[in-house]
Image (cartoon, rainbow, N blue to C red):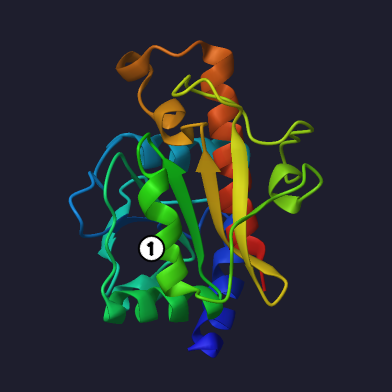
C-alpha cells in the first residue's frame, strides 16, 4: 500500500507545477452522530484558493469518503470536521491507520464540541501515539504562508487560544488537529459567518499550508 502512495504523492506534487493536472481532496464521513457534513462550502473555497495562490489544479467538487472505504487511498488530503460524537469501529480504525502510515494525511478541524471524542477515537487508530502540540517552527506553519505565532484564531468558541496538535508517526506528521480555531468556518462562503476579510484570509492561508504540506510529503 505504501508504494501506491509513493506514486500518488509524486503525481499530486505535480499539482503545484502544472494546472493541467487535476486532483481532488476529500471530506471524511464517520459514524457516531457528529455532523461530519458541516461547513459544506469550506473545501470548495479552499480548493479555489489553493488553485489561485499555489498554482494547483484541485477539483472544487471535493469527494466524500467513508472511514472504512478502500477509496480512502485515492486521496492525499482528508478533512474531518463536526460538532459532536465520533466513533470508529475496529475495521475503520485499521483502515484509517493503514491510510495514514502509507502516506496519507488527515486534517481534523474541531468545529466546536469534537474534542472529547477526537482523542479517544484517534487513540484507537494509533494506540502508541499521543497528540502533541506542534511548535511554531513546524513545517505546517512555514509553507508558502508564514504563521510565526502558530495556528490562527478564527472563531471565539470557549475563548481559549488556538492550538495545533499533531500525531507523528516515524517522524512524519500524519494528522493535524486544529483546536479552538475553526479553520473550516473561515473557509466557508463570506455570507455564512460574516468573518472580517483578514480573518477569512488567515484561515484560507493556513488551510493552503496544510494542503501543500500533505501534497509534498514523501
Name the residue at 31% across, 18% down: 192
Of residues 48 and 106, the one nearer the viewer is: 106
User: Which residue position is annotated with label 1?
Assistant: 121
Reply above or below: 147 against 138. Answer: above
Residue at 48% from the left image edge and 34% from the top image edge: 183
Q: x, y (%) of residue 148?
A: 79, 33
Q: Nearer the viewer, residue 170 or 146?
A: 170
- Residue 72 position in % (x across, y down): 35, 71
Q: What secondary structure is found at the residue carrying circle 1?
A: helix
In the image, residue 53 above or below residue 29: above
Locate residue 151 relative to residue 182 in the image: left or right. right
Question: Viewer-proximal residue, 178 or 37?
Answer: 178
Indicate left or right for 10 with 185 as reference: right
From this viewpoint, is residue 140 visible? yes
Give percent across and percent down for residue 182.
Answer: 46, 32
Tag 1: Cα neighbours inside 10 Å, few (<14), some, or many (≥20)? some
Q: Is residue 208 left or right of residue 21?
A: right
Q: Could you say where residue 15 lies in the image, as x and y percent from the top left?
A: 56, 58
Q: Quadrant of residue 115?
A: top left
Foreground residue, 55 or 138?
138
- Give the image quarter of residue 52: top right
Amino acid at each position: 500500500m505504501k508504494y501506491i502512495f509513493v506514486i500518488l504523492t509524486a503525481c499530486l506534487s505535480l499539482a503545484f507545477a502544472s494546472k493541467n493536472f487535476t486532483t481532488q481532496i476529500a471530506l471524511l464521513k464517520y459514524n457516531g452522530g457528529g455532523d461530519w457534513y458541516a461547513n459544506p462550502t469550506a473545501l470548495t473555497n479552499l480548493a479555489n484558493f489553493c488553485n489561485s495562490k499555489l498554482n494547483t489544479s484541485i477539483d472544487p467538487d471535493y469527494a466524500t469518503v467513508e472511514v472504512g472505504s478502500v477509496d480512502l487511498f485515492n486521496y492525499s488530503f482528508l478533512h474531518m470536521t463536526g460538532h459532536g460524537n465520533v466513533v470508529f469501529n475496529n475495521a475503520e480504525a485499521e483502515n484509517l491507520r493503514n491510510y495514514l502510515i502509507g502516506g496519507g494525511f488527515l486534517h481534523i478541524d474541531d468545529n466546536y464540541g469534537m474534542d472529547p471524542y477526537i482523542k479517544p477515537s484517534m487513540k484507537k487508530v494509533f494506540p502508541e501515539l499521543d497528540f502533541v502540540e506542534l511548535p511554531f517552527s513546524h513545517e505546517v506553519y512555514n509553507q508558502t504562508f508564514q504563521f510565526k505565532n502558530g495556528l490562527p484564531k478564527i472563531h471565539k468558541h470557549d475563548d481559549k487560544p488556538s492550538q495545533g496538535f499533531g500525531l507523528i508517526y516515524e517522524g512524519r506528521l500524519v494528522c493535524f488537529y486544529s483546536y479552538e480555531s475553526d479553520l473550516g468556518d473561515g473557509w466557508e462562503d463570506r455570507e455564512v459567518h460574516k468573518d472580517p476579510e483578514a480573518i477569512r484570509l488567515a484561515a484560507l492561508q493556513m488551510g493552503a499550508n496544510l494542503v501543500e504540506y500533505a501534497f509534498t510529503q514523501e
